[in-house]
Image (tube, rainbow, N blue to C red):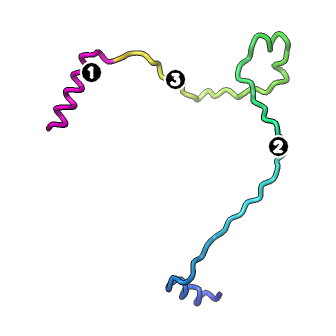
Amino acid sequence: LPERERTELKRRKLLLEVTLKSYWIRKGSAFSTAVARPETELTPEMIATGSWRDRPFKPYNFSALGLPPACGHLHPLLKVRSQLRQIFLEMG
């Protein structure tokens, strides 16, 4: 359609323009039907047999944060005090 007719039809809401996207998916050079899980730990048996040389290992993530320590709790009286404070704040 000419530009003028297209804008007129769009203004009258008789034309809706839709953009279609398509993708081509192909098998890459590392494609495999078998799922090989990389090793996460080096065991003494691997070192003794020398099998660690042939196995893929998962890369180590040095920027990962560890688990927070699960220690320390509020004193029971501090818990009660904070609950009472919350109740009084809700009451106004």
Query: For mark 1, does the 10 Å Cα neighbourhood hold few (<14), some (14 to 19), or many (20 or more) residues?
Result: few
Image height check: is 71 above or below 56? Answer: above
Residue at 54% x, 27% y is: 65
* Residue 29 placement (x, y as % from top left): 84, 45
As for residue 21 lying within the magenta part, the answer is: no
| Residue that mark 2 sits on | 31
| Residue that mark 1 sits on | 79
Decide which of tag 3 and tag 2 comes sooner along the chain: 2
Q: Amino acid at mark 2?
A: Phe
Secondary structure beneath label 2: loop
Which quadrant would the C terminus be assigned to in this image? top left
Q: Find the magenta span and give its range.
A: 74-92
Residue at 59% x, 86% y is: 6
Q: Quadrant of residue 39?
A: top right
* Residue 27 placement (x, y as % from top left): 82, 49
Secondary structure beneath label 1: helix
Query: For mark 2, does the 10 Å Cα neighbourhood hold few (<14), some (14 to 19), or many (20 or more) residues?
Result: few
Residue at 19% x, 31% y is: 87
* Residue 20 placement (x, y as % from top left): 66, 68
From mark 1 to mark 3, how far is it between C-alphas? 25 Å
The residue nearer to you, when weighing 86 against 60, is: 86
Which quadrant would the N terminus be assigned to in this image? bottom right
Q: Amino acid at mark 1?
A: Lys
From mark 3 to mark 2, how far is it between C-alphas? 35 Å
Name the main secondary structure of what is drawn in magenta.
Answer: helix
Decide which of tag 1 and tag 3 comes sooner along the chain: 3
| Residue that mark 3 sits on | 67
